[in-house]
Amino acid sequence: MTDTAAAPPLARDAAPPRPMWHVVLVRPETMTLVLLVLGVIVGSQLSEFFLDINYILKSFTLSAEFAIVALVLTMVIIAGEIDLSPASNMALSACLFAWAQQAGVPMPLAIVIGLVSGVAMGALNGLMVIGLQLPSIIVTIGTLTLYRGLAQVIAGDKSIRVPEWFTGINAVFIAGIPVPVLVFALLSIVLGLVLGTTMFGRQIYLIGTNEVAARHAGVRSRRIRMILFLLMGFASAVAGLMTASRLGSVRYDLGLGGELQMVLMAMLGGTYIFGGRGTILGTFLAAWLLVIVTTGMIVANWLPAWQLCVLGILLIVSIIATNFIYSRTQR
Amino acid sequence: MLKKSLLIGLTAGMVFATGAFAQDPLKIVYIGKNTGNPYFDSITGGFEDACKSLGCEFEFVAPATAEATSQIPFIEAQIQRGVNVIGIAPNSPDALNAVLDSARAAGILVLTVNGDLTGNESHRDATILPTNFDIVGRDQVEMVGSLIGYEGEIAILSATTEAPDQNKWIVGMNETLASDPKYAKMKLVATVYGDDQPEKSTTEMEALLSNFPDLKGVIAPTTVGIAAAAQVVQSRGIAATVHVTGLGLPSEMRDFVKDGTVTAFQLWSPYNEGWLAVHFAVGVLDGSIKNEVGTTFEVPDLGTITINPNNSINTQASLTTFDASNIDDFSF
């Protein structure tokens, strides 16, 4: 700013536009990418067995189901809501599917039952949050427990086998990439485009930034949030069936604790927990980051205690960085 | 006799050792149910000592939680590391099938140690169990019978309602009580479940005492349950009237035995499971042991071991009884 002195006093009110490189580079996703690259470098130093693309892809399939749901969860969080029930939803929809096919229901119908029940669970969350105006964190902590409980009622403590042909989706490769990883990548592109380029996407950001203002501006907030909860239910059911296929059997504890991993992925990717900010790209990178870091430590035979410490530190660092970056670029 | 078996053991050990030194040292890994469990420290100790004496490399890994699928990434990692033997205490009887299959396809010898893939035995090469689980129930009834003079009311304080091992033993206890005239004057009045949580187990034990004032004996076939039951008996000072026994860890039960709260309880030696697993694995891989039902082989300190149906191998024929006379000999 060489002409500050010459500028009229009015110019002090308007902040100078951020330079292009600043907009592109100073954002949480950059931090995630840097951490990801660091993770790969450190991982390859920790163990000679780490740097093997097939092994990393294989390891990713173990978290791919959670990662797929995390993509949708990112949109829910951007809209200012949260859903903590998806892992329980995965278990209940998978249990209903497995129970139905075991009871003699034809497989295609059993799959439909699983998917529909997932959507219904999303709808129940949505109705309570939007219809009854209850806080989503409380509602979904409730359904997190409820869905898991129902899954145990249905499946008991035994596991239900699924037919042989249905198993092993993680061992099916298209162009050298396991199917769950491919699904995750394609969904990332689709949701990334929806969130980044469509009116629907922009409205999600608006709702998350200021719900009341968005409604006054004519955004159909209730409807959009309901759609997000339904999508969440559907994605969870798909993830549940994919897990059932990978494991070859279904138990009520399928995906236990997965909601934390999903939230972790969204947070590591720079999604702002209070809504209004975040990207699919961030969650995409964060899912890889999480897999790289955990795989690197596991193949180096690190003790779980240290693994938990590293993951905790990673999350805290990313939250601090995200908050810092957002506060700097806010206005 | 002892000298002879020692001698055989030593020779066998030396044969194995030289066999193992011929190529790269064998890499053996044991995947526990979860970390921070003293029981597994003892199994690991057996693995370590045997690997030291036979010249193989050993590592212990375990997930943070004992959730059904938490061991999968650890198995994948060991395949990637190219180990020769995976010993595992499976957290699920079937969720590990696929990954164990890929381990075996990679040429890894897969042994379940201290727990088996019940119903899915074809997904592992052999299982090493502490003792014949079919007779644990019978032995436990005899134990409590001897404590209460084979007469009076007894109760069972178990783990969870679905715990497969405990349920198998409880069936054995009921059958023994019903069929053996020796125990005709003993009456099983209740079977309760403490879910392997100290608080719940304590509550269940208190409830037993108030519901059945004439209770003379309690069998708790779980390490958490027996410790909780003993704690209740100790704090109420009723050791003379209510006899607690079951399956417990010497380390956790030592004080109760020393102060007379508990006279005797049983378990096996987890250490021997690790010791046996390594000797078996090394023998199978160097060709000196055929992994077939009916094969017998010698293991130092343990004597002659037989491979039972389903490729199941036991470290000891029956339970070890711990009381004031021997409890100080055990550290696990």
Image (cartoon, coloured by chain):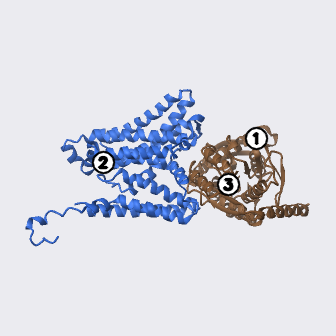
Chain colours: A blue, B brown
Near-viewer residue (A113 or B182)? A113
| Amino acid residing under circle 1 | Leu
Q: Do the residues labelled 3 and 2 touch (CB within 8 Å)?
A: no
| Point 51% across, 58% down: residue | A294
| Point 47% across, 61% down: residue | A311
Residue hosting label 3: B86
Q: What element carries label 3?
A: strand
Q: Are marks 3 and 2 on the same chain?
A: no
Residue A144 makes an appearance in the image: no
Lower sequence index among marks 1 and 3? 3
Residue count near mark 3 (Cα–Cα under 10 Å), binned few <14, some 14–19, many ≥20: many
Q: In which quarter of the image is the N terminus of chain A?
A: bottom left
| Point 60% across, 57% down: residue | B62
Give how far across and how far down residue B220 sits, in percent: 67, 50
Q: What element carries label 1?
A: helix
Q: Are marks 1 and 2 on the same chain?
A: no
Nearer to us: label 1 or label 2 = 2
Q: In the visual, does B162 lie left or right of A204?
A: right
Relative to A214, does residue B229 appear above or below in the rendering?
Answer: below
Give how far across and how far down residue B310 sits, in percent: 75, 43
Q: Which quadrant of the structure image shows residue B5?
A: bottom right
Residue hosting label 2: A196
Q: Are marks 1 and 2 in contact (CB under 8 Å)?
A: no
Q: In the visual, does A121 lie left or right of B74?
A: left
Give how far across and how far down residue B318 sits, in percent: 79, 51
| Amino acid residing under circle 3 | Ile
Q: In the visual, does B74 lie left or right of B184?
A: left
Distance from disc 1 to disc 3, alpha carbons, whole Å, reads 40 Å
Kindly identify which chain the residue marked by label 1 belongs to: B
| Point 77% across, 62% down: residue | B20
| Amino acid residing under circle 2 | Gly
Q: Across the whole image, how many numbered discs are drawn on residues?
A: 3
